[in-house]
Amino acid sequence: MSVDLEEIEALQKARVDPSTLTVVGGEEGLTLRERFRRTMQYQKVDRIPFFEFGYWDATLTEWHKQGLPPEVDNEWRAYEYFGIENWHTAPIHTGLLPSFPEEVLRADDERIVARDGARCTYEVNTKGHRSIPHYIDFGLKTREDWVEWIDRLDPTTPGRYPDNWDELAARYNKRDYPLAVPIGSLIGIPRNWIGFENIAMMCYDDPGLLEEIIEKLCALVCGVLERALRDVEFDFGAGWEDICFNSGPIISPRFFDAWIVPRYKRITDLLHRHGCHVAWTDCDGNIVPIIPHFLRGGINCMFPVEVGGGSDPVAMREQFGTELLMVGGVDKHKLAEGPAAIEAELMRLLPVVEEGGFIPTVDHRVPADVSLANYKHYLKVKRALFGCGKKRPQYDEALV
């Protein structure tokens, strides 16, 4: 059954018990930064932040055929068009510096084969929509390779910070939006450099090398962040792992506890000493089996909570309680099914939103089978139901 938008707005206005609900009135005039911080701290807000994940190029192409203005031709212009709010990430370099030379090895009308800045060879489809790169060879395989990488992971290398960092820091300290400090990756990036099968073999053939790589990345992040955390008050640390299939993580909990948890604890302890108590990681797939281990390492916020991959925010809140924060969790496939499915999905998430510690967004980029009309309906219902950006009339036209 379709839920009437006026009925939803009436329900929103009728929620008047501040002792039981987080998303209620009474805290008007908050900045986006304040809304984010209070939501992540289970405090009352006038509305939650109006975040979203993003869009595939093929999705925008399809939407142009359905009436999206042609000038809305990339993700950031789409955010502006739809009135999506966003966080910022400080431009601090926590990866290979300098990276290895990139080069195109061959290209035709259907695909490009290239070598990236980590000496990994990949191919991408150039016909149709943008695809995730398919890697066919990897740059870090042996101790001999590693020798060429070590100096590129030095936290003191010039270029880790932009030349105008002092100016940026002064501006950041006057901001009204959420700001993240990058906290890197301890196993997802090494998996990309080494390859999935290769890293599994390395665990047995040369575990000392793998641990050395992980330790080097941890030391890099801690070394680089000291300056940033002294200069700026950050709202959260943002990392990336992507180490889970829909069937579960690619590494064992024992491996995670032995090699990853203690090093994440060093990173998050550093954040905590500087007043930053939210640390999230971007990890698709079924993350549930390793959430307890992330939490032990101080990574307390999961993104994008991919429902189709086995990570359901309602079940996760029941299992892990308010210790776990979440951003994401709206099943992207429901958006293709039409208004009734969209409304049912958002209503399903309402109790978790009201409890706090959860900012709903589509659980990955919006796929091309979602119509523009359905996506507009999703945003309209989300605004009405969760109070997201209802007082931004300049964007109303985009949702008609």
Image: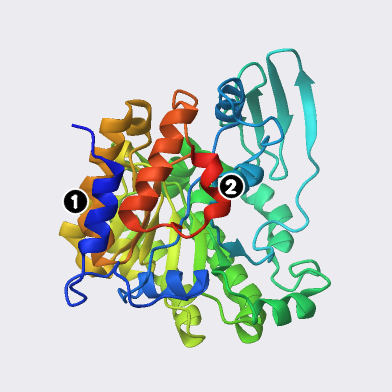
Location of residue 243 in the rendering, given as x and y in whole percent from the top left corner: 42, 46
Color theme of the render: rainbow
Task: Please indicate, yes or no, whether residue 235 appears anywhere in the rendered image.
Answer: yes
Which residue is the extreme one toward the top?
Answer: 109
Location of residue 235 in the rendering, given as x and y in whole percent from the top left corner: 51, 74
In the displayed structure image, the side of residue 13 where residue 127 appears, left or right: right
* Image quadrant assignment for residue 320: bottom left
Q: Which mark is residue 153?
A: none
Tell me: residue 298, above or below residue 210.
below
Q: Closer to the N terminus: mark 2 or mark 1?
A: 2
Q: Nearer the viewer, residue 355 or 223?
A: 355
Asked if labels 1 and 2 touch by Cβ distance under 8 angstroms, the answer is no
Label 2 crowd (10 A; few <14 / some 14-19 / many >=20): some
Location of residue 116 in the rendering, given as x and y in whole percent from the top left corner: 71, 39
Q: Nearer the viewer, residue 67 or 93?
A: 67
Label 1 sits on residue:
315
Q: Nearer the viewer, residue 251 or 273?
A: 273
Q: Nearer the viewer, residue 333 or 268?
A: 333
- What residue sits 69% from the left and 64% below the top? 91
The secondary element bearing badge 2 is classed as helix
Task: Please indicate, yes or no, whether residue 311 appears anywhere in the rendered image.
Answer: no
In the displayed structure image, the side of residue 193 where residue 105 appears, left or right: right
Three-letter amino acid code at the position of disc 1: Ala
Label 2 sits on residue:
79
Tell me: residue 82, above or below residue 290.
above
Three-letter amino acid code at the position of disc 2: Tyr
The secondary element bearing badge 1 is classed as helix
- What residue sits 46% from the left and 56% below the top? 50
Tell me: residue 140, above or below residue 358.
above
Q: CA distance from mark 2 to mark 1?
A: 29 Å
